[in-house]
Amino acid sequence: MKTGRPNSISKSMETICINLAREGKLDVEVAKILNVSVSTFHVYKNNNKEFYDSYKRAKADFDDSVVEQALLKRALGMVVTEVQTRTVDGKQTKMVIEKELPPDATSLALWLRNRNPSAWNKERQNINIEVESQRGLTMEECLEIIKNDPFAKKVDCGDV
């Protein structure tokens, strides 16, 4: 009977590992479920490139989906629950408080730019002001128009 650390993980155990990674489990948790040490699990991952790549991709998929959902919630606004401990008449009481977080414009802009870059690309949002060097206005007058109308597409700025 062979004793000591197992030096390999079966294909069915690999599948279990990948599914656990998709659920967001940490390496330490995966190793515990497999009943192997963390160092054995790390050695196995490092010695099996195909498994390592699949496992890493599964962890990244989980991370991406969690962050994506958190960003969407923050962009749209959400209600958060907070537990506060307060002392009232010498007694400590726990209070559950719900707070509404309003929609966050920065999160919303990030979400839109990444989900639909052709419509929400940062470059499209920049205002393009074209200043032509033709007869007409002085430079000061051109600058005044631009200052007062940031959406001016074309300004006749005279000879500059």
Image (cartoon, rainbow, N blue to C red):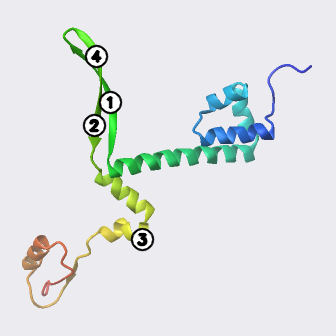
Give the secondary structure at mark 4: strand
Estimate the x, y position of residue 127 in percent, counting from the top left: 25, 71
- Cα distance in 3D space between marks 2 and 4: 19 Å
Asked where in the image residue 105 lies, by quadrant, the reply is bottom left
Residue at image mark 2: 99
- Name the residue carrying label 4: 93
Quote the CA–CA distance across marks 4 and 3. Answer: 52 Å
Q: Residue at x 40, y 57 (%)?
A: 111
- Quick check: 88 above or below 66? above
> Image point 12% across, 91% down: which residue?
135
Nearer the N terminus, badge 4 or badge 3? 4
Measured Cα–Cα span from mark 4 to mark 1: 14 Å
Q: Nearer the viewer, residue 152 or 68?
A: 68
Seen from this angle, which residue lies furthest top?
90
Mark 2 and 1 residues: CB-CB less than 8 Å, in contact?
Answer: yes
What kind of residue is marked 3? Ser
Between residue 43 and residue 10, name the one nearer to us.
10
Q: Amino acid at mark 2?
A: Lys
- The quadrant holding residue 131 is bottom left
Mark 1 lies on residue: 82
Residue 66, horizontal then vertical, whole percent: 49, 45
For disc 3, the marked residue is: 118
